[in-house]
Image (spheres, rainbow, N blue to C red):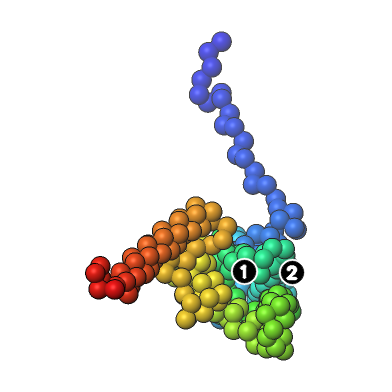
Amino acid sequence: MTVTIDDVSEPPKARRKRMTGKERREQLLDIGRTLFAEHGFDGTSIEEIATVAGVSKPIVYEHFGGKEGLYAVVVDREMAHLLDTVTKALVGGHPRQKIERAALALLEYIEDSSQGFRILVRDSHAASATGTFASLLSDIANQVEHILGDEFKDKGYDPKAAPLYAQALIGMVAMTGTYWLDVRKPKRDEVAAHLVNLAWNGLSGLEPKPYLTTDHKARQKDLKAKAKEAAKEAAKEAKESARAARRASPEPGTA
């Protein structure tokens, strides 16, 4: 029996898998996050979200009640993620290491979740249940306040000033992160090292080549450089002392 092309039926077309309600909700959140990051709240429409998702507008309304509801969930998720990331970094270790880890955690969030950070720094919409980016930074500063308060007590400073310094510290890191979001130079660890250098040492005590205490190679290199410089200074002082001693000694035959 001869089989012709007409006798061979075409394979059935693969049917698109129908999304569950949970899957559809996550899809809309991902799409909304991307569009809000690119165009902002006012520049994004329900029509655009629905079109990208391949659904009708009523589907978006069904899940979130409108653009405000979708935006609120996106913002609340990002704020919770960032707060949790930085708070975990503040647990355990020396105060300087805590600040280093907190700075690194914020920069890591900016690097890995740049869309979310762009949404947050636009000053979160009033629809958000969590609040604004400023309120988020204040929550993080409250965590840092306890660290600085203990450090102030140990050094004999007034712990009542800790909240002010905590706000200043977190504000400095956040503003630097906003700048670094676009330039992405230098590398993350180097940015964190410079931030901690200023925060920990102050302008009058800046290290020429700052490094993170967790960077053991950089630490060893710095210690060797300091030891070499100290040995050089010691040798110089020894020479000066020997010259002074010779000048103070009476010439032979003049005693």
Give residue 106's position: percent from left, percent from top: 59, 68
Residue 130 appears in the picture as rendered: no
Mark 1, residue position = 96
Residue type at mark 1? Arg
Which of pointers 1 and 2 indicates the residue nearer the eye? 1
Residue type at mark 2? Glu
Helix, strand or loop under label 1: helix
Q: Residue at x 59, y 66 (%)?
A: 100
Residue in the foreground of this view, choosing between 58 and 168: 168
Q: Which image quadrant: the C terminus?
A: bottom left
Quarter of the rendering containing residue 155? bottom right
Q: Residue at x 45, y 56 (%)?
A: 224
Helix, strand or loop under label 2: helix
90 lies above or below 19: below
Q: Residue at x 57, y 64 (%)?
A: 104
Mark 2, residue position = 62
Mark 1 nearby-residue class (10 Å; few <14, some 14–19, many ≥20): some
Residue in the foreground of this view, choosing between 199 and 58: 199
* Residue 132 - label: none
Q: Which image quadrant: the N terminus?
A: top right
Quarter of the rendering containing residue 122? bottom right
CA–CA distance in space, label 1 to label 2: 49 Å
168 lies above or below 230: below
Give residue 18's position: percent from left, percent from top: 70, 50
- Which of pointers 1 and 2 lies earlier in the amino acid sequence? 2
Q: Residue at x 25, y 73 (%)?
A: 254
Quarter of the rendering containing residue 109? bottom right
Give residue 226's position: percent from left, percent from top: 45, 62
> From the viewer's perspective, is 216 left or right of 70?
left
Residue 94 appears in the picture as rendered: yes
Label tally: 2
